[in-house]
Each structure stands twice: as C-alpha cells, then as structure tokens.
Image (spheres, grey):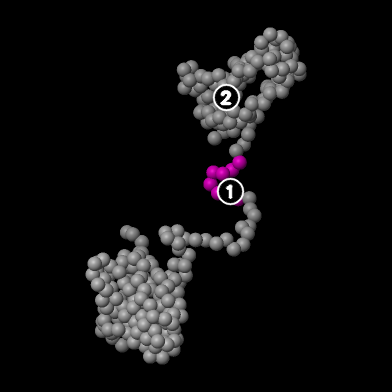
Amino acid sequence: MSLPYVVSEAIWAAKDTTETKVLKSDFERCSVTVIEVTTAAFTGTLDIQGILHEISAYANVPYIRQDQATVQTPSVTQISYVADTGTYRYVILGYWRRIQLVMTASDGTITCGAAGSSSANLFSYMTGGGMTPAQAAAMVTALQIIDNIVSGSEAQVDVVAALPAGTNKIGKVAEPVTVETPFTGTTDEDILAATHKITPGAAFKLVEISLHLSAAPTTGTQNLVLALDSAQGAAYDQVLLTIDLVANAVTDLTIKPDRHFQSGDVITAAWTNTDDKTWGLVYKHQLE
C-alpha cells in the first residue's frame, strides 16, 4: 500500500490586482483539492476552472463550498465578493488534468491557497470525521509551510545556529586502531623473512614500515627486501620494495605503503646484516 500523496500551494497573499493563476501540475495526482480564500474588504470575482487534457479549453468546474452548514449543491458559477471580509473553502469535484483560478479585483485584497491529496481520508470533513473549518484552515496553513521548504523534489534546511559539539559517532566511523609490531636485532642477527613478519589474520591496511640502524652499512650491496606472501598462493606473491642500504647510506628508513591486503596475507622483511649493525624494525597496520 502506497502512502497518500499530499500537495499544497500558496497562490495569492493580500493580492489587490487581477490575475489568472494555473496551479502546479502536482495537483493532477490528487483525488480531492480544496481552495481556501480569505478576503479583506474585497470586491471582485473568482472562477475555478479546469481542463481534462492539454488541448482542451479551460472552463468552470463543479465545486462545493465546504464551510457552510446547509447541504450544498455543486455549482460551476462565478463566485462574487462585494466589500467582503471572510474565509471560504471550496472543494473541487471530479478529476481535472490542470486547474486554474481566474480572479478579478476592483477593491480590497484576496489571499488564496490550495491543498490536495490522493486520499480523501486526509480531509476528514469529507468522510464523516468531523473536521471543523478551523481545523481545515490549520491543515492548509501547515501544508503551505511544508511547501515553503521544498525546492523541486528536495527539502531545504537552514542551520540557524551552530551545531552542538559532541563525541558520538554515527555508523562505522570510529577511528581505526593502529597495531605496532616491533622487532630488534643485535650485531650478529639478520632480518629474516621467516621470522620478522606480520600475519594479522584478517583484512588489513599496511600503514607504515620503519627501520633504524645503529650506523649506515658500508660493505658491498645490502638489500632490504619487503615482500607480500599472498594468501592466494605463490603466483600472487609480490616484492613490495627493494632498497640498497649501503648505496643509500641508510640509518633511518620510513615507508608508508598505505595498501590494503586480504585475510591470510603475510608481510615479510629480509636483510643480511653484513656489517653487524644493531637494528630495529617496526610494522604498523590497521585491521579492517
């Protein structure tokens, strides 16, 4: 079951000049439409007109004046006001593709709005619910206020004061925890892929790998190799980085891969400590 469709439109506000106004096309989806008129010493006329299709001509349509106590007979006649001050509501009968209001003004002002719904049950005075004219007026006003915040198909919201400070989080937006895995070695220890590795056991992001040496190595070529031992098998293994610590005179090295890996992947490091340096290796990762 679909929800009832409701639409409203503010047509004139204290209008004192003649005008013809075509209601917005949204009203063609309504099974009942109510026109509210408020006059202030107004002298003029109002015709409620409609068309059934785009190429037909506008003509007066049947309506019932809702706020009268006596039984009403549908009318299509022009509504006339002479120095009139009051509020009136007219229920339009039948389906009309488009509706227009033709108003002539010779004195005073007229204010007018329209409200419609795909379900007449929303207008309880039409279904035995006993809505009073005051309640109907309040409903029209409320619908007009709602209509004022809508631009196209979007509701517009103005922030009129600073949002309060807070620490609550919505959804999965908590700060990720960074896990550090350190290894250290003395002068006679190498960095071994089989030993100096991380195996998070879940999907993770490799944030950083850092290496500190007591002094830069100087003998030959001494490559530090960082690699992925893939959970999918050897065919997917990768060398992530190879760097010669001698050629680059490395004492401190920080690498920020910022890469994502799957559960079961292992990150390894390997280096032959030819010059017997003291070293410290730290992995940093975040589980996902």
* Residue drawn at (26%, 76%) of the image: 59
Mark 1–mark 2 Cα distance, whole angstroms, equals 30 Å
- Tell whether label 2 touches label 1 (CB within 8 Å): no
Residue 93 seen from this side: no
> On the image, numbered disc 2 is attached to which residue?
199
* Residue drawn at (29%, 79%) of the image: 63
| Residue 234 picture location, percent across and down | 48, 17
Please identify the quarter of the rendering in which residue 258 is found.
top right
Q: Residues within 10 Å of mark 1 (few under 14, many from 20)?
A: few
Q: Is residue 94 magenta?
A: no
In the image, residue 37 sits, relative to residue 286, either above or below, namely below
| Residue 132 picture location, percent across and down | 40, 81
For this view, does 132 lie left or right of residue 176? left
| Residue 37 picture location, percent across and down | 39, 80
In the image, residue 286 sits, relative to residue 133, either above or below, namely above
| Residue 116 picture location, percent across and down | 35, 70
Check disc 1 and give the amino acid type: Lys
* Secondary structure beneath label 1: loop
Check disc 2 and give the amino acid type: Thr
Query: Magenta residues?
Result: 168-175
Please identify the quarter of the rendering in which residue 101 is found.
bottom left
Quadrant of the image for the N terminus?
Answer: bottom left
For this view, does 130 lie left or right of residue 283? left
* Residue drawn at (72%, 17%) of the image: 249
Please identify the quarter of the rendering in which residue 99 is found.
bottom left
Q: Main secondary structure of the magenta part?
A: loop
> On the image, numbered disc 1 is attached to which residue?
169
* Residue drawn at (46%, 80%) of the image: 14
Q: Which mark is residue 212?
A: none
